[in-house]
Image: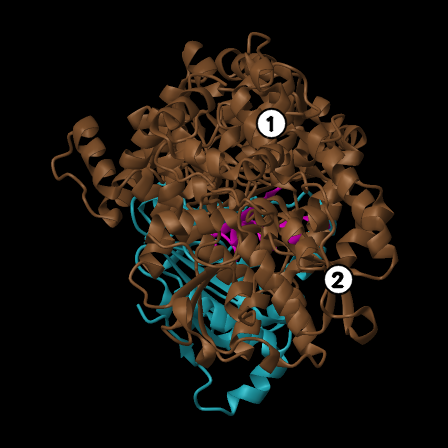
Amino acid sequence: MSAADRSTFKRRLDSLGVTVTEGPASECEDLVDEAAGDPAVGVALAEEGDDADDGSIALPDRVATDPTTAELRAAHTGVTDASLGVAEYGSVAIEADTAGTEPVSLFVDRHVVVLREGDLVPDMPDAFDWLGPKARDESVDVVFATGPSATADMGGLVHGAHGPKEVHVVLLRGDDAGADENADTTSDSEVTADE
Amino acid sequence: MSSDASKGERIRELMATEGDAVAENTRGFNQGRIESTGRLDDYEELKADAREIKEDAIARLPELIDEVRETVEANGGTVYVADDAADANRYITELTAEQRDADRLVKSKSMTSEEIEVNEALEAAGVEVVETDLGEWVLQVADEAPSHIVAPAIHKSREGIAELFAERFDPEDPPETAEELTMFARERLGELIEDADVGMTGANFIAADSGTMLLVTSEGNARKTVTATDTHIAVAGVEKIVPTVEEFAPFVELIGRSGTGQDVTSYISTLTPPVDSPVPDFRNDADPLADGSGDDRDFHLVLIDNGRMAMRDDEQLKETLYCIRCSACSNACGNFQSVGGHAFGGETYSGGIATGWEAGIEGLDTAAEFNDLCTGCSRCVPACPVEIDIPWINTVVRDRINRGEADPGQTDWMFEELVPDEEPGGLDLRTRLVGNYETLAKWGSRTAPVANRLADAGPVRAIAERVAGIDRRRDLPEFASESLVDWFDARGGPRVPVDSAEREAVLYPDTATNYVDVDRGKAAVRALEALDVHVRIPDLPGSGRPPLSQGMIATAESAAEDVYAGLATHVDAGRDVVVIEPSDLAMFRSEYEKFLPEASHERLAEASYDVMEYCFGLLENGGDPAALRAPAEGTGPVASGTRVAYHPHCQARTVGVGEHATAVMEALGYDVRVSDTECCGMAGSFGYKSDYYELSMDVGEPIREQFGDTDRTVVAAGTSCTEQIDALLGDAPMHPVELVAPRE
């Protein structure tokens, strides 16, 4: 991941009408809280070595993790993490895992997706280089989602055909980038689509 | 040919009822493609990669099918290779109705499932089938067929959908806006998906190395179809297999851009089923979602042969299997933009490539129904992400139709002298008349005053329309009494001596220039000689373009051999070959690859130039622009000054010589406005045919909209374009070389 990838990624998301908020992993809970509507369900974020050390990747209490199907059906927002981001396209990779990341990201009006900046790759070939071994060795199921669900079948472009009407990306900065930018008072910069 | 009267009638009806919606949508998609692919730095490389992957995959298909079986089974799924539609439907129906005892199957969009007509088979077995793609669902409710392979309901307007929903569902508050209609469908279909037992999807690509399938979607219905049901059936043609997951990448970058102009669609699902997601139990919804129910999922990959393995063995149809069904060839096609897939399509597939699919899957009869609508304009060729020569497939199929459906009762013995072709007796008369245009033109020129008068006579036109299908509303070409070759000989041949010439060139006397529009030939001679070119005009045969357009491949091939024989010594002597008619230059550069030995084709292709391309090159290499005619000197037809409207020929665009005329005219000081329309719609003989007259005029309509009230001098290089623009604007344009050549 380079600074150029991050800015490309954000620019692409902006053009797709996707809101992006950024911050260090320690602010994840707040960032998700700001992004999620009510009621919200979620899948506990994967614990990764570095991040788990400070125990900072957490979801707000109001996000029901391990929801029932009824809670999913009633939810406005689904919070999941993304395994990968593709800068050139503004895509996030959603893994259809046993924890229910796929239904939680799909059967809702708003999908709040948490992506670690270190998981951002420049372009599509990188994404499929990443996917190849995981598909062969682990039989993973991954959806590359780019913006909200959309259709033009009813006489005009409409967001929210079957899947989420809105997507919000929470971009968690890595330790190095975080250290640099924490000095900056505008660290929680927000890119908002002009909707 | 079958029932032509009803064919023309059907086309006129579709243009009136669906034409506007189809035109708006397809032209939008086409513009989107141009913009989206324009944003790719490595577009040509990606296309070449995609092509190479498909060539490799189809070459190794039997081996890849075995590999997919192994990987899918290792993942816990099942693979069934169905020989044909009935075989596939039997397997799917037994699985769904008997083994799963399913009441409802939900489907995401799949052309292959439409090809095998699985919905009908399932419904006959008592299984309710619900299409969940919104466009497909609209058509299911309306009981209509798709008109486009990617956007199936583009022929329907928003108002039409609103009326349909109001009538069929009688809702309390009928939805009207696109937003309301979408939300209405989302809710209704959401409930139907929750209670479904089995989910069916297609697959855009399948990786043999892992059993991973890739689905290109935007709505999210395929995701829901897979997630909400515990039994997933994927139906895909065997040609969808590629060797590895990594090889998905170029297709993901190309497919959305090529089709609807989206850089990427909302969802690219890469599933290695059975998927791991838990199955939401909407009936007992108090239980936790993540209950380990993903382990109980069942997956069946049904691979469809249905003629594909035979296509793979067919050297000409094989290329069809590289098709990724992006719809670029539909959207780029002038005729498709006017009529849509209900006219330009077969049982399942539509657009230019459909001829290959329908010929391979259904047979020649089905392809024959709509194959005429490919005029060979070639604008789909650069649009195809896997570089398929779609016009060639149409030509091959036309040739087979000519040979297979010949009716021995034809009365063409009357015309045998006028149709000295290489084709079997009994070939449709109108096909042969057009295919032998060169002989007609020669005869017409020899007997010009009489032939022209006869051609204009009412009774003759009536017979021409009835017997040969030539529409009475078209002006027929007027033959010149002195051919270009004769004129050149009579003037004493070249006027620039070899010794003092910059270059030596052969001006190819194409049939149209030689016998009909001799003036543009004379202008070309003046322009080239003004730029110090030693010009020769040998008597050479026609290029074979007219017979090729009629699918008369053997005749075209023989013409190619004759032309090469006539030009070989000139090319060997280092002379350039300059061509006025763009469709003939395109023959030399492109189609002759199929007819001549590789070295011969390369030699001729490299030595050949479009006349404006040649002028451009001469000017670039020190030629004096003052030798040509600048706008200030213009009188007569160019008295209106420097302003020019230029319509480049479709095939000239494809072989990359559409813009040289613009550059030359601008270098001389003309202010040039270039037509946005990729093909005028005339396409050789197409627009002359009674069945297609209105369609041809409709395809050319954007030219009239752009240039109809212009005060610019209109120029166009193609003979057909000239005739079409004359009909559209009421005034015949001249060839650009006539504008820039010094006056006599």
Q: Colour of chain A?
A: cyan
Left or right: where B515 falls relative to A151:
right
Q: Residue furthest top?
A: B409
Residue B358 at x, y = what percent?
56, 25
The kind of residue on which mark 1 rests is Arg
Identify which residue, B593 or B208, lies in the foreground: B593
Q: Residue at x 30, y 58 (%)?
A: A38
Coordinates of residue B76 in the picture (x, y in percent): 68, 30
Mark 2 falls on what kind of element? strand
Name which residue lies at 36% across and 55% down.
B731
Q: Secondary structure at mark 1?
A: helix
Taking the image as shown, residue A137 lies to the left or right of residue A70, namely right
Crowding at dot 1, Cα within 10 Å, few <14 / some 14-19 / many 20+, comes out as many
Question: Which residue occupies the foreground of this view, A73 or B714?
Answer: B714
Q: Residues within 10 Å of mark 2 (few under 14, many from 20)?
A: many
Colour of chain B in the rendered structure image: brown
Mark sitting earlier along the chain (2/1): 1
Q: Is residue B715 left or right of residue B591?
A: left
In the drawing, what numbered circle is on residue B398? 1
Q: Residue at x 40, y 37 (%)?
A: B340
- In the foreground, B557 or B26: B557
Tell me the magenta residue range: B246-272
